[in-house]
Each structure stands twice: as structure tokens, then as C-alpha cells.
Amino acid sequence: MRRQITGFSNPTVKHLRSLREKKHRKAAGQFMAEGLRLLTDALACGHVPQVLVMGEQRDPHPLLAKLEAAVERTGGEVIETSEEILSKITGKDNPQGVAGVFAEFDTSLAGIDRSAANIWLVAQALRDPGNLGTMLRTGDAVGAGGLILIDDCADPFSVEAVRASMGAVFTQKVAQASWGEFLPWLRSGAGQLVAASLRDAVPYRGAPYAAPCFVLVGNESRGLPEDYEAACDLRVTMPMKGRADSLNAAVAAAVLAYEVLDKVDS
Amino acid sequence: MRRQITGFSNPTVKHLRSLREKKHRKAAGQFMAEGLRLLTDALACGHVPQVLVMGEQRDPHPLLAKLEAAVERTGGEVIETSEEILSKITGKDNPQGVAGVFAEFDTSLAGIDRSAANIWLVAQALRDPGNLGTMLRTGDAVGAGGLILIDDCADPFSVEAVRASMGAVFTQKVAQASWGEFLPWLRSGAGQLVAASLRDAVPYRGAPYAAPCFVLVGNESRGLPEDYEAACDLRVTMPMKGRADSLNAAVAAAVLAYEVLDKVDS
């Protein structure tokens, strides 16, 4: 049954709005995703929102009806509210008409089955949530298993990361670990660790990639620490024809991941 | 000679701050770039700031001294101010210690010499300034000549685009044109127009790219209009292994541009 909310000061509105901040997301163990397409992708991957918030003015849509039914079947809450309040909740001037609140996923390394995919993306100290979301999206495109976040990365459940992932936050596994946790985990099984690097590197094109291949990119400003690079099985470099000596982190990951895909996808 | 500014309400502070808004940039014909590295790259490409703003607390640096000398030699203004005011001007909590105001460049198609490079990036209705700046950065990396912005794109001189370009706004040519202007210009000389597309496309890997190759990507949400795609010489598609049917626009441009580079860079 739909619940109508008309007041800006409603406690539910306040709670939903608070999920834009990391500390409130962690406290609630929840995050928010917007848009019918994204929520439909989530549902297809088995993620049903705990709370579904819909604008009153939205057009009826069979996918929305399906979503609503799923939420009610699983004991979730369906809320109908004004576009103004939806805008306040999502922090967007033009809200997408529907938003869902999900339980945050388990992001432990233990949840990663490396044999499930030939490619895994790994980011170290990635600070920009847009880059993080873009890496998830790229991971989905190249058929990666997921994204492993090393050290102090942006929150994969932030509104910006979820938005930039275009739904891939639901299709890709996400893990968070320190380098000290990640490296022993990696070495406990099969896996080639490949870094985009300028040091002691071979051309990225046609390099001897092997599955499962873990594609590692570093922080936006500082790149990878030298000892992290040294621990990699393979260091590769992309041509840099201009003044710059690096690419945007999400771009580097994508160019490299597509090159790996050409090798390991057969 | 350095001019000290201590007051937030100083008219110069107000003017510099106003450059964060497009209408003020267009009215003044100026834009702002931050950071010693970026300003040094600009200088190396022959772009001297009209105004150089430095924080009082910054450490002395030979590159900064060189920059200051260049500004004074060309009759520009050097301003020294507090970190708080610098922060207000650049809109960043941790300003980079130095910012420069530049005259906006000519962005007419007439300024593009297509024979100057084997690759040109082209974006249609690209709305995100971060994507735009990232495309400039990628263009620099692949040795592209520049970025041609078709229809209603984000402003290449916005703070976000300049930041994301990591200095490439100074190394890459930028042109702005409508599709109706661009297509006749393209057809008036040599040039292969290539689109990342899902329609009637060949695999992007090993496609018959030819220089000068114009790599075209479309709007973040809608992609390219069908008739724009139809006007291309080559439509190529990247593998999409997951649920998504598209990549981030800047990522698609980069994966494609690196593939083109492998073919035309010889």
C-alpha cells in the first residue's frame, strides 16, 4: 500500500535525505539509487529496494508497477510524494520520478569469487566518486566480475558513484580492503595483477595478460605507490603523445581493461 | 609588481570570482585555471595569464618565479592575497596556491588545421564539464589535434572542464560549431568521421581507421542522433558484456581513440 508524504519535515523525508551523507549511510546500512532504468536493472539482479519513493506526477509505467509489486511482496515500503520533496530527497533539481533505498551490500574480499570472471578492476585510493562509478560501469561493459577498492577510496554507495555507475553498482561485485589485506588474498589463488605504470613497463598493447586479470589503477593525483607497482606481475604503459604523463584514472582503467578483454575473452 | 589584496569585497576579487559563471566568462572573455603545474604547462604552450593570483603562504618555487616574470613582461597583473580569499576566488576549500586568468581562445572551426594531427576528437551535446575536460586530457595523450564541440556542449572554459583537462585545454585546439556548420567543413577536406555506435557497426578493434580520423561521441544520455550516425564514414562498436549498452562518453572516446592511434600512428 502506498503511503503519501506531503510534508518536508516528515521524519522519513529527513531520513532519506540524510542518506546523501556517508555517515548516515553507514549508520543506516542503506543507500539510494534513482531512476526507473537503474531500479529495474537492480531488480533484475535481485536487489529489491527497502523503500521505493515515487513522484505523484509520474506517468504510469509497467516497469514501475513491477517494481512496486516487488517491494510490497518483500515487505518494503512504497511512498508517494510531490516532485518538490523528491527533489529535496535526491538533491537533484530534476528528480527522475522514482528512487529506491537499498541495504548496503557486503563488501568484504571474502565475497569475491575470482573464478567468476576473467577481469577484475582494482582501484587504489580513488577519491572521485564519479571515477569510481565510471569504473563500475566500465567493469560491467567488459564483463568484469567487480571492483576492488584498496585503501581510502570514495564511497561506492554515494549518490554520485551510484549515478555514474548507471546501475553497474548492482551488477558488479564491490569489495573494500587495505593493501595489506588485498595482496595476501590475491596471492592465495590464481590472479595476475597488472598496473598502468610509467616505471619498468611494457607496452599495454598485446602484453601477456592472463585471466583472472586484476587491472589496478592508482589515486587521481599521486598514482600508485612505488611498492604497490613493484608487487604487480605486469606493468604496462599506454602511449602518451602530448605534454601529459597520465590519463584520467577511469579512462586508464577502461583503455587497459578493453585491451585485456581482447586477450582473455576467448 | 605584486599588488596585495586583503579584502573579500575588493572589486578584483569579485571579478575573479564571477568567472566561475559562464555568463561572466563570456562577458569578460576570460577564464581561470589553477595550479602551478597547469599554469606552467600553459606558459610552455605560449599562454601567459593576464592576471596571476598567488596565496601569501605559498612556498617559493622557480616555476612560480618564471610565471610571475612572464606575466609582468607581458603587462599582466600579479596579485598576492590570503588563502581564504584565494579559496573564495577558486571555489575550492584547498586552493592550489596559485591561479591564472586567461583570455578565452578563438574556438571557430576556421582555427582548426586538420592536417596538424592524425586524430581529432568530436563531441556532440556533451553536457558534463568533467567529461569534456577528460576528453581534452585524453586528446593530449593520444596526440590528437583538438576537440570539436558540436551543438550545445558544456563550456570548455568552465572551472570543472579546465580542471579535468589537467592542462590539456592549453595544448589542444578547441572548436565549437553546430552540426550544420561542422559537416560541410569536414567534407571540404580529407577526414574520416567515426562514431561509436550500436547501429550498423563493425567491431572497433582493427576497423579501417584512416587519418585524419575524427572520433565522434554523443550526448551522455541520448547518444548520437540517428542522422548524425548515418553521416559517419565508419560506425564501430565496442564489446558490451554486461547489462549496460553504453560506456561513459569520455571513456568511449578514449577506448576508441587509443584503438585509432594504434592504426594511424605509424
Image (cartoon, coloured by chain):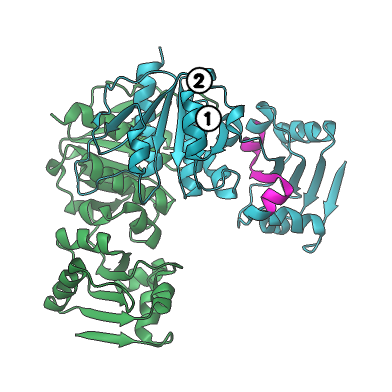
Chain colours: A green, B cyan
Q: Quadrant of the image for the N terminus of chain A?
A: bottom left
Q: Residue A77's image quarter?
A: bottom left
Q: Nearer the viewer, residue B66 or A49?
A: A49
Residue A3 horizontal/vertical position (percent): 26, 86
Mark number displayed over residue B146: 1
- Please report the residue visible at 55 percent of the width from the left and 38 percent of the height from the top: B176
Label 2, residues with CA under 10 Å away: few <14, some 14-19, many ≥20: some
**Residue type for callout 2:** Ala
Q: Quadrant of the image for the C terminus of chain A?
A: top left
Label 1, residues with CA under 10 Å away: few <14, some 14-19, many ≥20: many
Span highlighted in magenta in the image: B24-40
Q: Looking at the image, is B256 positioned above or below residue A72? A: above
Report in which chain the residue with disc 2 lies: B
Q: Earlier in the sequence, mark 2 or mark 1?
A: 2
Q: Residue B17's image quarter?
A: bottom right
Mark number displayed over residue B117: 2
Q: Nearer the viewer, residue B261 or A50?
A: B261
Residue A34 horizontal/vertical position (percent): 32, 65
Report in which chain the residue with disc 1 lies: B
- Is B25 magenta? The answer is yes
| Cα–Cα span, label 2 and label 1 | 8 Å
Please indicate, yes or no, whether residue A183 appears anywhere in the rendered image: no
Q: Residue B8's image quarter?
A: bottom right
Please indicate, yes or no, whether residue A95 appears anywhere in the rendered image: yes
Q: Nearer the viewer, residue A214 or B131?
A: B131
Q: Looking at the image, is B79 positioned above or below residue B72? A: below
